[in-house]
């Protein structure tokens, strides 16, 4: 208990000439924790929203493809029904993604795009796709009809009812692949949370095209029950037991490049914030070293009145623990409060900016949300504490090793 | 018959300074009996402080042994030595070093807290001691607000708080002016007498040395008793 009191006094006592260093370090840790919590919780929220869009819109939760033999032996409907029987699976949609060339004769514009041919029921069923993709105008595509992403529609100048010419590469008689042109009616535009998807994709109904495509090119997209979305390994095992020759890929595997990029982005952000704490750590090292130098005669006296050799170590590390924990506690409280009111804070910042520039800041006007993860905060807090202790020890170890009485008599 | 408190048996101390071995004390043997006051005098650098450090368990002899009430200090580990200093020894240093971040009262009872006493008990005893040395109205002041003489009185109270068997004083008046020195000398000897303590004192002050029951001169690494 005495050690803790001594550590506290050494950190905050009015007679301590170095206490301004304590306050600077404390403020640094608080601001650091605040920044790290707000940034990470914002990032968590944005990333999780993005990943949610990716696995719901772009790739399904799991994708299954079958080898030619299975596809030719078992019908598409039978395969869908069989996959639907897997307990973790919520919905199954047969679909094909292919690159096409789109031409809009009415605007005389053309572009390459991705055609997703999928069962039109996907728009009506309750599933992650229908939750996140909304038809801005028009209707769900029927036979030889298509709907386009809002940005793509704008790019091609597509209006409702326009005839769109679509050139695809299909199996030819004389050659392996030959261009084939089909005409579709543009019946609607949609928007999702993925701008890239909206800019590149048209969607058509699979039923009228099934014969033309052939069952071999079909991929089966599975949506899983909520609690299995991030535990898709179990589903993969189940499907592999049912169809050992099927290729089953989870949404992480399908989007591995994108997923890795997001993970890397987070790691880099951690590193960036970590360096901020390293700078604080160096500050702590110097402050502790200076303070120990000033206090060595006092520590020598304490040794003379009965303290053990380890007292100085305990006091200085104790001081670091007190300052770090206080800074972390304040930073966590401030971070969580700021995270919860991030919208209000950004809106206020936007108002301040508007006062000076008479312009709204698009970034500050974005409806950000945050996602605070307690385990993540605990890991950060523990790491910062460990770092602080390490730097304090590094700053004092030379003096810790000296016998205090040497300092007393030979100073 | 008086009880032997501490015994030095053929104690030598050498320090290694680079390639050179410095012999500071050589073959010292003497006994400190309970209740006596011993003054050690000698030139600067003659090894007086080293002798006190060895007596107080802050340093170990290179050869020979020091026993306290039959226990050899050299055989004790750091925890046991710390406990020995806390319970049996009271130190008074020349530079009256106090802890700046604590009041005079807290400075006095810190050794009692280290020894495991309850704070209230320790505080009560500290107040008593500070009143006896005339610092009743200064006990809540920080050391920076006290004069050199007042600080040394606080240091003497700190040395007495755990009711030690042996008071070790290293030139306790060395950094004080003449007036303060006289007061502190008188106070130290009075308190030692009243509390029936044993005193091992290092001093250059012959007046002060003469008031002790035995005076040793430390010269050429050895000690001899002065008449």
Image: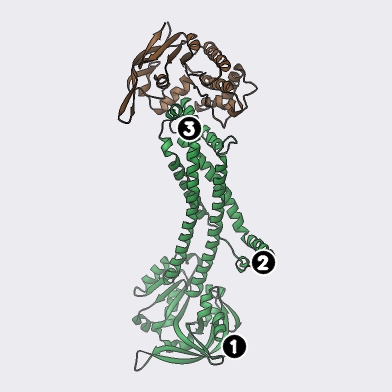
- Dot 3 crowding, Cα within 10 Å, few <14, some 14–19, many 20+: many
Residue B225 marker: none
Task: State the residue lying farthest toward the left.
Answer: B19
Q: Colour of chain B?
A: brown
* Mark 3 vs mark 2, CA separation in Å: 56 Å
Q: Colour of chain A?
A: green
Label 3 lies in what chain? A
Q: Judge by depth and name the residue closer to the eye, B179 or A233.
A: B179
- Dot 1 crowding, Cα within 10 Å, few <14, some 14–19, many 20+: some
* Mark 1 vs mark 2, CA separation in Å: 41 Å
Q: Residue at x 56, y 49 (%)?
A: A30
Give how far across and how far down residue A74 sits, in percent: 38, 82
Q: Which residue is mark 2?
A: A357
Residue A296 marker: 3
Give the mark nearest the N terminus, 1 or 2: 1
Q: In this orientation, does residue A22 appear?
A: yes
Quadrant holding the C terminus of chain A: top left
Give the mark nearest the N terminus, 3 or 2: 3
**A341 is higher (above) or lower (below) than B130:** below
Mark 3 secondary-structure assignment: helix
Q: Which residue is mark 1?
A: A160
Give the mark nearest the N terminus, 3 or 1: 1
Q: Residue at x 51, y 39 (%)?
A: A319
Camera-nearest label, 3 or 1: 3
């Amino acid at each position: 208990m005495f050690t803790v009191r001594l550590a506290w006094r050494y950190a905050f006592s009015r007679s301590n000439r170095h206490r301004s260093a304590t306050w600077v370090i404390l403020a640094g840790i608080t601001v650091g924790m605040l920044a790290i919590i707000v940034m990470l919780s914002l990032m968590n929220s944005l990333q999780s929203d993005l990943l949610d869009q990716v696995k719901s819109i772009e790739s399904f939760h799991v994708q299954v493809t079958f080898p030619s033999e299975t596809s030719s032996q078992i019908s598409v409907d039978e395969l869908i029904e069989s996959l639907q029987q897997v307990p973790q699976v919520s919905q199954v949609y047969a679909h094909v993604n292919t690159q096409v060339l789109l031409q809009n004769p009415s605007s005389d514009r053309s572009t390459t795009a991705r055609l997703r041919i999928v069962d039109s029921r996907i728009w009506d069923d309750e599933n992650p796709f229908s939750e996140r993709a909304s038809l801005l105008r028009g209707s769900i595509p029927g036979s030889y009809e298509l709907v386009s992403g809002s940005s793509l529609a704008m790019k091609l100048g597509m209006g409702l009812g326009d005839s769109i010419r679509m050139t695809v590469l299909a199996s030819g008689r004389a050659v392996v692949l030959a261009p084939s042109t089909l005409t579709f009616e543009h019946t609607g535009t949609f928007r999702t949370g993925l701008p890239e998807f909206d800019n590149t994709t048209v969607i058509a109904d699979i039923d009228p095209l099934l014969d033309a495509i052939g069952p071999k090119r079909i991929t089966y997209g599975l949506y899983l029950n909520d609690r299995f979305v991030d535990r898709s390994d179990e589903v993969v095992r189940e499907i592999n037991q049912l169809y050992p020759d099927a290729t089953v890929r989870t949404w992480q595997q399908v989007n591995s490049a994108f997923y890795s990029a997001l993970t890397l982005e987070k790691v880099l952000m951690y590193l960036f914030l970590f360096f901020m704490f390293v700078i604080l750590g160096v500050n702590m090292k110097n402050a502790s070293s200076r303070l120990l130098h000033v206090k060595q005669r006092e520590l020598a006296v304490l040794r003379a009145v009965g303290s053990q050799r380890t007292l100085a170590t305990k006091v200085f590390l104790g001081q670091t623990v007190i300052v770090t924990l206080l800074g972390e506690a304040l930073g966590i409280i401030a971070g969580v409060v700021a995270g919860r009111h991030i919208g209000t804070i950004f809106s206020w910042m936007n108002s301040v900016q508007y006062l000076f520039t008479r312009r709204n800041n698009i970034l500050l006007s974005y409806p950000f949300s945050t996602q605070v993860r307690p385990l993540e905060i605990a890991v950060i807090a523990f790491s910062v504490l460990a770092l602080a202790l390490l730097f304090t020890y590094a700053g004092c170890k030379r003096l810790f090793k000296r016998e205090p009485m040497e300092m007393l008599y030979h100073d | 018959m008086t009880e032997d408190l501490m015994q030095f048996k053929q104690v030598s101390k050498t320090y290694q300074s680079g390639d050179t071995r410095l012999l500071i004390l050589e073959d010292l043997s003497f006994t400190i009996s309970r209740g006596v006051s011993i003054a050690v005098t000698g030139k600067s650098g003659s090894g007086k402080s080293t002798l006190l450090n060895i007596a107080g368990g802050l340093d170990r002899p290179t050869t020979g042994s020091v026993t306290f009430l039959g226990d050899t200090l050299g055989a004790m580990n750091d925890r046991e030595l710390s406990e020995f200093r806390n319970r049996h020894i009271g130190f008074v240093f020349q530079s009256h070093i106090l802890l700046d971040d604590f009041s005079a009262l807290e400075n006095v009872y810190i050794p009692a807290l280290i020894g495991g006493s309850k704070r209230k008990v320790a505080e009560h005893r500290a107040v008593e001691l500070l009143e006896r040395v005339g610092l009743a109205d200064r006990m809540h002041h920080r050391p920076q607000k006290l004069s050199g003489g007042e600080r040394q009185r606080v240091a003497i109270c700190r040395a007495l708080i755990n009711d030690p068997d042996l008071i070790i004083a290293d030139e306790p008046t060395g950094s004080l002016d003449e007036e303060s020195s006289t007061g502190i000398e008188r106070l130290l000897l009075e308190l030692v007498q009243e509390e029936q303590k044993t005193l091992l004192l290092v001093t250059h002050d012959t007046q002060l040395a003469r008031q002790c029951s035995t005076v040793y001169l430390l010269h050429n690494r050895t000690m001899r008793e002065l008449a």
